[in-house]
Image: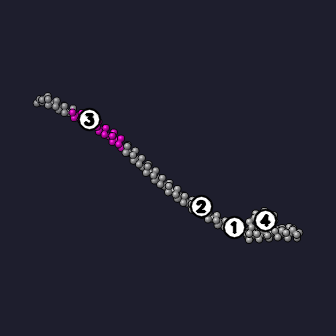
Amino acid sequence: MEEKNPSYVEGILNTLSDLEKKSETLSLEVEEMKKQLISISYDEIESIKNQVINTANKEAQIIIETSKQEAEKESQRISEECANELSIISKNIDSSFNKAVEMVVQKIKSDFILANNNSNANSSIVKKTENLQNTIISGTTKRSKKEDLSS
């Protein structure tokens, strides 16, 4: 066999050694790049997560505000309906009040006349009752019920 030059073998060994060093350096650089890529990925994930949370909060706020406005409109509508119903009830009471007073006066008159056969007392009571009835129906004076009964 042919003997090779020791410098030739040394050159190959040196080249292999350099190649091994470069390979190790590349491996270290790849590991560092992996770490950086993972770090960047986590940062991006956190950023996107915050964006999603902010967007969800904004949408939730819009939904809440819309619901609040709808509830206020509904509340206003119900309030107006109640006011209208109250007005109708008040008108019904006002329109029936004179009739109710007349019925009560007639009942008191008839009960009192039946209970007392004294003609002087009856005529006095009848006059007072008629005056009370005429006053309420005509609406000329607005005295309390106690004042009307005591006259």
* Residue nearer the viewer, 60 or 142: 142
Q: For residue 36: magenta?
A: yes
Q: Does the rendering let one see residue 81?
A: yes
At 64% from the left and 64% from the top, the residue drawn is 86
Disc 2 marks which residue? 79
**Scheme of colours in the image:** one colour
Pointer 3 with pointer 1, Cβ within 8 A? no
* Callout in the foreground (3, 1): 1
Q: Which mark is residue 94?
A: 1
* Callout in the foreground (2, 4): 4
Neighbours of disc 4 within 10 Å: few (<14), some (14-19), many (20+): some
Q: Earlier in the sequence, mark 3 or mark 1?
A: 3
* Residue nearer the viewer, 117 or 144: 144
Q: For residue 83: magenta?
A: no
Query: Dot 2 lies on which element?
Result: helix
Q: Earlier in the sequence, mark 2 or mark 3?
A: 3
* Callout in the foreground (3, 4): 4
Which residues are the magenta region?
18-41
Query: Dot 1 lies on which element?
Result: helix
Q: Which mark is residue 54?
A: none
Q: Earlier in the sequence, mark 2 or mark 1?
A: 2
Q: Quadrant of residue 44?
A: top left
Measure the alpha-carbon separation of dots 3 and 1.
102 Å
Q: Earlier in the sequence, mark 3 or mark 4?
A: 3
Disc 3 marks which residue? 25
Q: Which mark is residue 148?
A: 4
Where residue 88 appears, as percent x and y from the top left, is 64, 66
Where residue 113 appears, as percent x and y from the top left, is 84, 69
In terms of secondary structure, what is the magenta stretch mainly?
A: helix
* Amino acid type at image mark 2: Ser
